[in-house]
Image (spheres, helix red, strand yellow):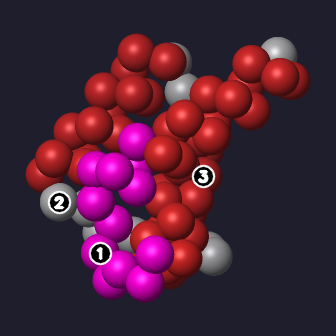
Amino acid sequence: MNNRQVKKFCKLDEESDALLKQAIDELGLSARAYTRILKVARTIADIEGVGDINAQHISEAIQYRSLDRSHFA
């Protein structure tokens, strides 16, 4: 998924956007990590058959990112 597709298919509601921004600030993640989390959240929503990404999907994607960082840091 390129940046244009991310903007088109990974739209967030206010709650999800706030959660993701808080995680980026608190975990010190980069803009690249922001995009990766969005892509993972989109995949999670797709697997569940849900059209919109919600806070639960963002939360799960952040957890996967945190696991990834702890194993390869």
Mark 3 and mark 2 in contact? Answer it, CB < 8 Å: no
The residue sitting at 40% across, 55% down in the picture is 57
Tag 1 and tag 3, C-beta contact below 8 Å: no
Foreground disc of the pair 1, 3: 1
Label 1 and label 3: CA atoms lie apart by 17 Å
Magenta segment boundaries in residue numbering:
48-59
- Residue found at the far front of this picture: 48
Residue 17, labelled with which disc? none
Amino acid carrying mark 1 in the image: Asp
Mark 3 — residue? 36
Q: What amino acid does circle 2 point to? A: Asp
Asked if 73 appears above or below 66 in the picture, the reply is above
Residue 21: x, y in percent? 32, 34
Q: Secondary structure at mark 3?
A: helix
Q: Please check the rendered image and state whether residue 52 is part of the magenta-colored stretch, yes or no.
A: yes
Q: Which residue is mark 2?
A: 13
Estimate the spatial distance between the alpha carbons at disc 2 and disc 1, rounded to whole Å. Answer: 9 Å
Compare marks 2 and 1 and give the one earlier in the sequence: 2
- Label 3 amino acid? Arg
**Real-space Cα separation, disc 3 to disc 2, in angstroms:** 18 Å
Label 1 element class: loop
Q: Residues within 10 Å of mark 2 (few under 14, many from 20)?
A: few
